[in-house]
Image (cartoon, helix red, strand yellow):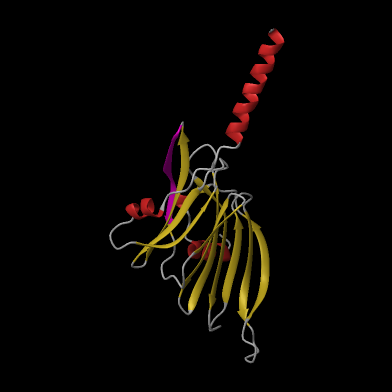
Amino acid sequence: MERSLVFLAIMLASGAAHAASTHPAASAMSDAELRRLLAPGEEVEARVDGDLNGDGDLDAVLVSVKDDDRTVRVFFTARNAARISHVAAGKFNLLPGALGPAELSIDKGVLVIRDLTGGTSATSTTYRFRGEATAPKLRLIGLDATAYSRTYAHDGAEMSWNLLTGDIITAQLKVAPDDSDRGYDKVGAKRARRPASTFYMENTPNPEDELNLIMEGK
């Protein structure tokens, strides 16, 4: 009898664990839910869904635009028993002057935002964020920026900043002297290090300002 009870308990525990592991992933916010968050005149520029905090459920990332104001918003999907809700996890403003929609992707839990802004003189920026498992937050872990002329009218500069380690790689972009083959020569590549920094999405630094500071050695 005792062995039967032990066997039954093991089977019940195994079944519960199996049910939990095969629980279907909750979907991200619907388009209708997202539209209700938009202000009058605000439109969706880009959207991507994926798991950002490792819980197996789909979270939602949205870029909204009104006039030249562009805002990234992130919503984590949360469970409370049978109830599913969507919790704001972060937002920040992209640079104005978009030269096309921002490109959003989620790779192994990391949100990657690629953005091109400006005009003839442009800034190409890549942001990388990682979701926190214990709180509805996203931490900036990487920031790359390149300032250049789309017509090669002037020199440029680029940086790649790993905020987890503080490592920074910079280079100057010099207009190639050969008029028949317009382009940039990358020169003066350097490595430097800042103290490791913690920036959550709401405090994302301006990539153009950071590029200028870093190129000045600050």
Residue lying at 57% horizontally and 78% vertically, measured from the top left: 155
- Point out the residue furthest to the top here: 1
Q: Height in image: 70 above or below 157?
A: above
Instruction: Kindly report the secondary structure that dominates the magenta region of the rendered protein.
Output: strand
Please identify the quarter of the rendering in which residue 65 is found: bottom left
In the rendered picture of this protein, how many numbered marks are placed on residues?
Answer: 0
Q: Nearer the viewer, residue 151 or 79?
A: 79
Q: Quadrant of the C terminus?
A: bottom right
Q: Is residue 142 visible?
A: yes
Q: Height in image: 133 above or below 95?
A: above
Residue lying at 33% horizontally and 52% vertically, measured from the top left: 36
The image shows residue 212 at horizontal and vertical percentages of 52, 66
- Point out the residue furthest to the bottom here: 180
Q: Quadrant of the N terminus?
A: top right
| 81 to the left or right of 178 | left
Please identify the quarter of the rendering in which residue 88 is found: top left
Q: Height in image: 22 above or below 178?
A: above
Q: Nearer the viewer, residue 72 or 171?
A: 72
The image shows residue 18 at horizontal and vertical percentages of 62, 32
| 41 to the left or right of 5 | left
Q: Nearer the viewer, residue 120 or 177?
A: 120
Q: Nearer the viewer, residue 148 or 55?
A: 55
Q: Which residues are magenta?
A: 82-92
Quick check: is 70 in the magenta stretch?
Answer: no
Q: Is residue 216 visible?
A: no
Residue lying at 30% horizontally and 57% vertically, measured from the top left: 39
Quick check: is 85 in the magenta stretch?
Answer: yes
